[in-house]
Structures are given as C-alpha cells and as structure tokens.
Amino acid sequence: RPINRTVPHLWHYDELRPLLLQAGELTPMEKAERRVLMLANPGLEGAPFATATIFFGLQLVLPGESAPSHKHSVGAVRMIIEGEGGVTTVGGECCPMEKGDLILTPAGYWHEHDDYGQGPMIWLDALDAPVVCSIEASYCTEGPPLARSDRPDASQTRYRRSGLAPYDTLARGPKHYPLLRFPWSDVRAALQDLAADTALHEPVQLAYVNPETGRECMPILGFSALMLRPGEELRPRRRSASHGYLVVAGRGETEVDGKTLVWEENDVFVAPTHATIRHRNGSSKERAFLIQVDDAPLQKKLGFYQEFTDGAGS
Ligand code: GTQ
Ligand code: FE2
C-alpha cells in the first residue's frame, strides 16, 4: 500500500465548539467571508486538510448574519450539526438546514448562508479543495446577494421519492445536479427500512446519488450514510480510498489501522487511503449513524480505485 502522510485522527466536537464560538466573537462576518475552523490532519504538516483529498471545516453563522454570495471551482457539501432557522441558497434554490441534512454546493454554483433563527448555525463543510488546489485550478468569484426562489427545494417536489423523476428527464437526459438537499429525516427512515432487510454485521449503508443517473452525487468526493445497530460491528472491505466521517447520532469506536478512535455525536474522524477500518456501535440499546465521505469517485475516474477482499495485505 502507499506510504501515508495522513494519519488516523479524531476531532472531538466538545473541544471544537468553544473554539468556533470564540471565532464568532473575534471575527465579524464583514472581516471574513466565511467563518470556518479547518480540521488539519496532524500528519499533513500544517496543510489545513483532513486527508490528502478531503477538506473538513466547521462553519459558524450567527443569528441575523449572512455569509455573502460567492462561487468557486471547488465543490462543497454541508452536513448540518446544530441550529434552527438556517438557510443556504444554492444556485437560487433555497435549502433549509436541519440537523443531519446534506446539502450540495457544486463547483460554479453561487451560494450564500443566512441564519434567520435565534441561535448559532453550525455545520461541517466537506470540500474537494486539496485536489482542486493541487492542480492550481482553484478560484473564487464574489457576487451580489442571490435572488432566491420561494418554492420548496427539489427534495420536497421534483425528487420527492426515489424511483420517480420528472417526466422530461427522459427526453432531455440527466442533469448533473438535479437534487441539492438530502433531508436527514428521509435518509434516517430509509436506513431504518434497509436495516430490516439486512443481516446483522452486513452494512446498512446508503449512497447519496444523483437521482437521474443513480451515480455519485459529486464528481470528486463520495457521500453515504451508515447505520450501526445496537452492539453491531462492521468490517467493511478495505478500499484504496481515503475516508472521513461525521457522527450524526450515537456513540462507538472505529479502529483505523489498529488505532482506536472513540466517538460520540458530532465528532469527526478520518482514515488514510488503503486503511483497515472496523466500526463498532458502543451502545447495546441505541443506533448509531455516520455520514461517510470518501474520494472513491475521484479514484474511479483516474482508473485506480480498488477494493480488497483480504482484510490486510499490501
Ligand atoms: O461555505 O462557501 O469551509 O467557500 C470553505 C470555503 C466553506 C462556504 C468553507 C467556502 C465555504
Ligand atoms: Fe463557498
């Protein structure tokens, strides 16, 4: 396997949250277009990246604030951690931000974030910035406030149910990003139903896909949701991809190349490429839910993505 600089690592939300709120006091929105705590992997020598391909940032928007409109060649995905009344506007589409929701900001889409609620909005950003920056293709354009639709987002209308797509899809062919918001309530219910039909210790895992193609929803990073049943241990096939995880609910531990990362709600952790990964739900009563981020879509496009059945190997 490759020699990794990225190390297995976990960031405790309990430790990050006070730092982020402190950043909220120190930095008004006028001084920083985005207020983000970057999760830097200790193996990457100061580069603000979580793995060689994944940027993770914890973002804060305070009540009444607006993170102004811009667009960039880097693709971003938000996973909502806490707060109510937040809205992110992506390409004119108005996406409410509720805990666990996953919201796409594809490359080139204008986006801004507003907190219309009473408390702070906090979420995890996953960006393909390490890749786009390393090929010197990263740029950003600032813009005027976005005109926004007052209609519900596509997850509530055009793509309300899997297996059904707007009829004109058949004539025009698939769009790149027909669905921008994946509400957690739907994902959680779908995982629950899948679990009822999945043997214990077999993964209960759903990929976030483009509903018109059935393929990965973003071109570089892949996203999926994973449920661990009470007491369950999972030994996923070893993959050539690197991985990051957000704990949406529950507690447990994950062994990455023999290092044990003990996690609870809202923690974030990463595993380098080719790592051996074991997940364990630490509760005998509660389910645990993780959102997994990986760079498999990029590796597939480059032609060297692999899965290994050995469990170890090199
Ligand atoms: O929310 O638009 O974490 O542009 C880094 C760059 C978030 C954003 C980040 C960004 C954003
Ligand atoms: Fe942005």
Image (cartoon, helix red, strand yellow):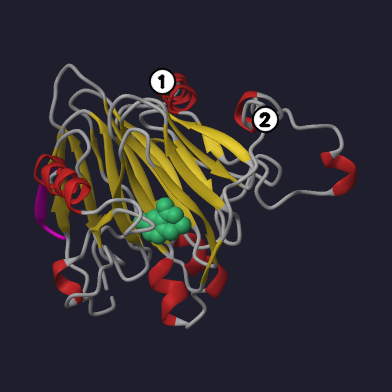
Q: How many neighbours does mark 2 have within 10 angstroms: few (below 14), some (14-19), or many (20 or more)?
A: some
Instruction: Specify the quadrant of the image occupied by residue 108.
Output: bottom right
307 or 75, which is in the foreground?
Answer: 75
Q: Which residue is mark 1?
A: 192
From this view, report whether residue 16 is shown above or below residue 150.
below
Q: Residue at x 37, y 34 (%)?
A: 64
Q: Which residue is mark 2?
A: 159
Look at the image and say whether residue 260 sits in the magenta stretch: yes
Q: Amino acid at mark 1?
A: Gln
Percent position of residue 114, x then y: 44, 38
Q: Residue at x 86, y 41 (%)?
A: 170
- Asked whether disc 1 touches disc 2, contact meaning CB atoms under 8 Å apart, the reply is no
Percent position of residue 171, x then y: 90, 44
Left or right, 156 with respect to 40, comes to: right
Q: Looking at the rendering, in which quadrant would you find the N terminus?
A: bottom left
Percent position of residue 43, x then y: 16, 72
- Write the start and end of the magenta stretch as one range: 257-262
Question: Under tag 2, what secondary structure?
Answer: loop
24 or 2, which is in the foreground?
Answer: 24
Q: Amino acid at mark 2?
A: Tyr
Question: Under tag 1, what secondary structure?
Answer: helix
Look at the image and say whether residue 227 sits in the magenta stretch: no
Instruction: Specify the quadrant of the image occupied by residue 263.
Output: top left
Left or right, 244 with respect to 150, comes to: left
